Amino acid sequence: MDVRQQKPYVIGLDLGGTNSVFGIVDQRGEIKATTAIKTQEYPDVEDYVKASVDALQIIIEQVGGIENIKAMGIGAPNANYYNGTIEKAPNLIWAKDKVVPLAQMFSDKLNIPVAMTNDANAAAIGEMTYGVARGMKNFIMLTLGTGVGSGIVINGQLVYGCDGFAGELGHVTMRRENGRSCGCGRNGCLEAYCSATGVARTAREFLQTRDEPSLLRELDPEKITSLDVSIAAGKGDVLAKSVYDFTGYMLGEACADFAAFSSPEAFIFFGGMAKAGDLIMDPIKKSYNEHVMPIFRDKAQFLISSLDGASAAVLGASAIGWEI
Amino acid sequence: MDVRQQKPYVIGLDLGGTNSVFGIVDQRGEIKATTAIKTQEYPDVEDYVKASVDALQIIIEQVGGIENIKAMGIGAPNANYYNGTIEKAPNLIWAKDKVVPLAQMFSDKLNIPVAMTNDANAAAIGEMTYGVARGMKNFIMLTLGTGVGSGIVINGQLVYGCDGFAGELGHVTMRRENGRSCGCGRNGCLEAYCSATGVARTAREFLQTRDEPSLLRELDPEKITSLDVSIAAGKGDVLAKSVYDFTGYMLGEACADFAAFSSPEAFIFFGGMAKAGDLIMDPIKKSYNEHVMPIFRDKAQFLISSLDGASAAVLGASAIGWEI
């Protein structure tokens, strides 16, 4: 292969507590080959990397060998872009109380450059590389899942901050009085309201404090999930819809503050909640325009990720590989 | 002069509603020559630029002519960096309801590149060029004056956003219920509490709602300024000190949210309020560490601008000239 020619593929690894999903991806975001291992089956990180590389060898051969692969990108919890480490990730069996230099470990085995960042940053880079943010220089990605994550792009660059941990917009304080307790140990964070767990909690609160009938009353309150709320709202359930209004209202308030920071051309939403479409996007936009400084009103676009949910995390991770 | 050699000076213009102050500045931030005109004496912007250039000619000659000058930087209200315009600045007689291409007008007359941004951004660039932020790639400048302005530096670049108006941290919402009305037409903004006007307002509120004796009670409440509060606090006045505690507490809360955004290595404070030193910085730091995500605790420095207050605005403006 001509060394001056760009190698056609990158490897993406979506590293979760349960599964590790690998994909080999081309420049247009097409996944050419994929494989997976169970993260939690390997209590020792050396064994984890070995099992990963063994699984990877098979799909690497499918695309013509490692010579065709430019780099590897990893999206992982508590990943630090600057030094390629995972730092004390409670959900990763081999990184609970440790700092693990995972990027270097993969790089040593595969002999290609490896870079790593957290899932939300990977999603933002994925969107910029393959998705709706192509060509954008300033946007904010908000991932609405179990938690609320964010990836911020300014002047075409991901914002990592002085320590690699910038972009924790799920943990700006939205309610300073009587704020809900958050997993981070503080109160009133955006995540405590607008994550999937937050939405389920809002539904439970509304069921308790309101009298109106609702499909959600047929369920065990403690077991209600954001999916239940979404299904009920889709059927026109008024209480379930008001849960989305409440959630969208707060997301709009938050985005109004984010605009004062970086004035992005778009806010892009990803994750289970974003699938609700207009149900969540309409209240977000309405609340945004109510709360934002007049100078920013009606400027930013509000978009839903265009990456396929099932493969988005692998695509996002792979996109880091092109940036190296 | 050897054209390959860097020209040794830049011009800085601190453009205010009352005065326009010009300085010729070297790379170490030394002001070599200075002059000024009255902004409001020229209702027509053509006349304003002509008077400015006439005044400038004299000091340009003092440093050996325009060949020695690399560029001009302007710090002005409502200035847009991207297109070099001033957009509807209520305090500028010739730009009240207009968009004025001031950078181009100066560039045409002087035959050097001219760039422009708002005062707070200029202060941030000034601090990065000549002050305490030298060598820093990620920091946030907060200017505590009549209003609260901000200049955000990420990856060594000023954040202008998609439209040139990013960095309005004085207008993030700090109190969502019963928030004070703000000059921007909204409620609860940081500026409504932590500007000089906000501090005077806090003092008036405390005088009304508390019984304790205070030196401030000798003054006409409607005429109390932040300077009065500062003087009283300096004398050990308990109520005046508690005004600083209140203000610092909120600034700490705000900085905690800003850390979640861009994880800066430093917050730098500029303006009258910052002169209070530990009186304001101690409560800011305390509140910051109470409110910030554990991962950011004790990481950022809290600094006071090292630029001389009287010439800081001219220095900041001039620093834009080096960036062109």
Image (cartoon, coloured by chain):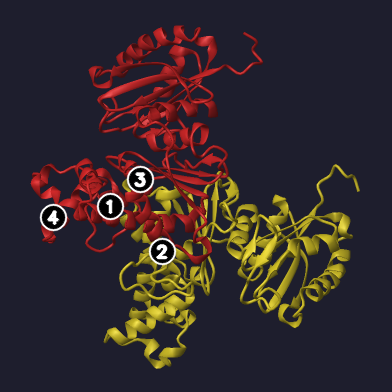
Chain colours: A red, B yellow
Q: Residue A291, which numbered label?
A: 2
CB under 8 Å between discs 2 and 3: no
The residue that disc 1 covers is A244
Q: Kindly identify which chain the residue marked by label 2 belongs to.
A: A
Position of residue A249 measured from the top left corner of the image (x, y, whole percent)? 33, 58
Depth check, mark 4 against mark 2: the one in front is 4
Q: Residues within 10 Å of mark 3 (few under 14, many from 20)?
A: few
- Residue kind at label 2, given as amino acid type: His
Q: Kindly identify which chain the residue marked by label 1 belongs to.
A: A
Q: Residues within 10 Å of mark 4 (few under 14, many from 20)?
A: some
Which type of secondary structure does the marked residue at label 3 adopt?
loop
Q: CA distance from mark 4 to mark 1?
A: 14 Å
Question: Which one is in front, A323 or B60?
Answer: A323
Q: CA distance from mark 3 to mark 4?
A: 23 Å
Please report whichever mark, 2 or 3, sits nearer to the chain's N-terminal start: 3
Does residue B236 appear in the picture of this structure? no
Question: Which one is in front, A76 or B34?
Answer: A76
Q: Residue A277, which numbered label?
A: 3
Quadrant where the C terminus of chain A is found in the figure: top right
Please report whichever mark, 1 or 2, sits nearer to the chain's N-terminal start: 1
